[in-house]
Image: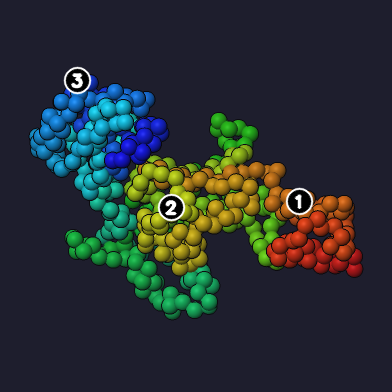
Amino acid sequence: MDLKTLDSILTIGETIAVEFKRCGNGIENDVYESVCSFLNRFGGDLFLGVLDDGTVIGVPQKAASDMVKNFIKVISNPTLFSPTISLSPEIVKTVEGKTIIHIHVPPSAEVHSYKRVIYDRVDDADVKVTATAQIAQMYIRKQNIFTEKKIYPYVTMDDLRLDLLPRIRQMAVNNSAGVHPWFEMSDEELLMSAGLYGTDRVTGEKGFNLAGIMLLGKDSTILDVCPAYLTDALLRKVNVDRYDDREVIQTNLIESYDQLMEFARKHLLDKFFLEDINRVSLRNILAREMISNTLMHREYTSSYMAKFVIENDQMYVENANRATGDWFITPDNLEPNPKNPIIAKFFRTIGLADNLGSGTRKLFKYSKYYSGKDPEFKEGDIFRISVPLDDSYSFDYSLENSKIKGSDASIINNGSLNGSINEPLNETINEPLTDDEKKLWNLYSIIQKRQKK
């Protein structure tokens, strides 16, 4: 490790991927606990001879080599570490001449224990994991298991909402220029084509999978298979400790999408906005991307209760997640990763979602028009999308006031016109308009002329 990188890490301090250890009396148990937690999470870096605040005190120079040998001996001992690992500690000399030991721990494809205890990394702490559900989620994450493919051999067509299929066929046709093979298929053929009925290639079992049950299952069937499944939709603007309005949604994903969208339409402003010369609903775009994301990419075997919450200054969704890292997602570092590819493909086919990654870019684009601020995407065991809200903000109104001076035109939040727009526009423009802005004002002129007739 170069000293410039080391200095930067010491300045930032401990994180989910960085741990400092004093090691004044040699390497103690907490070092191996940190190694175990890094292996079980997303990897990280250990620095021995550093205080928690980033102050370098160093380890005895003469003892550093023996400390490394003892460390390697412990992590190679199957009675202490299971399964054993191979790491290469590095002895580093700082600018001040002090000696520290750097250990890079990559993420492992297996679940590790130290002295028969499993550890996980939570923020900057090493935590013992004893709950069966948490250990199961760790194995799911490590082995890249798609739980939506689990077969339920005793679920039959009678357990599904087949009455939804005519609507689904029509949605697929509408989303594919008027032609889609599902339209001519029987119910059984459609379900197999969508991947909702299949074969477990390990056990040979055949039947409907978890994806099919979540998408089209009757409420009673879903309750039998996923008893903890629900989405809690909450409005918290006045009573922020409890709620002002609430919907507990425990039905199939198709109707869950409809009910969550209706909740959003009821409690969010539909601000006036033009894209080119077309009126588009910022509210519907933002809600659609958030809701489809939380339904498509949720880990349905988890007991964590998913939420859709609308507050005064933000709205957010939270759901259990098969995490691939712990970071904030932006358009620059976005790496699309389907958590439930069968469900995601079904949503895309019927037009409830677009290509992977496009939803993130849409939220970053349209959130600025809706509130003037960027959304936040937090990847972790609990996935969270937060979109800022500001009822007093209007992109359209701000645009008008930044370009027009001396006009008696005024536009209220819902986009209607008060007064008149002075003509010609060139006399009131203080600086050149962009092409999009010209289209906007041309449309206003047309509306004004129609009102005068």
Who comes first in sequence, dot 3 or dot 1?
3
Report the side of 426 relative to 333 (left or right): right
Which colour scheme appears in the figure?
A: rainbow
Residue most toward the top? 25
Q: Which residue is mark 3?
A: 25
Q: Is residue 258 above or below residue 105?
A: below
Residue at 40%, 56% in the rendered image: 335
Q: Is residue 66 above or below residue 415?
A: above
Q: Which residue is mark 2?
A: 333
Image position, residue 5 (x, y; %)? 35, 39
Going by the numbered disc 1, the residue's amino acid type is Ser
In the foreground, 351 or 208: 351
Describe the element under mark 3 as helix, strand or loop. Answer: loop
The quadrant holding residue 236 is top right
Image position, residue 24 (x, y; %)? 22, 21
Who comes first in sequence, dot 3 or dot 2?
3
The quadrant holding residue 246 is top right
Q: Residues within 10 Å of mark 2 (few under 14, many from 20)?
A: few
Image position, residue 190 (x, y; %)? 39, 72
Q: Which residue is mark 1?
A: 402
In the foreground, 44 or 365: 44
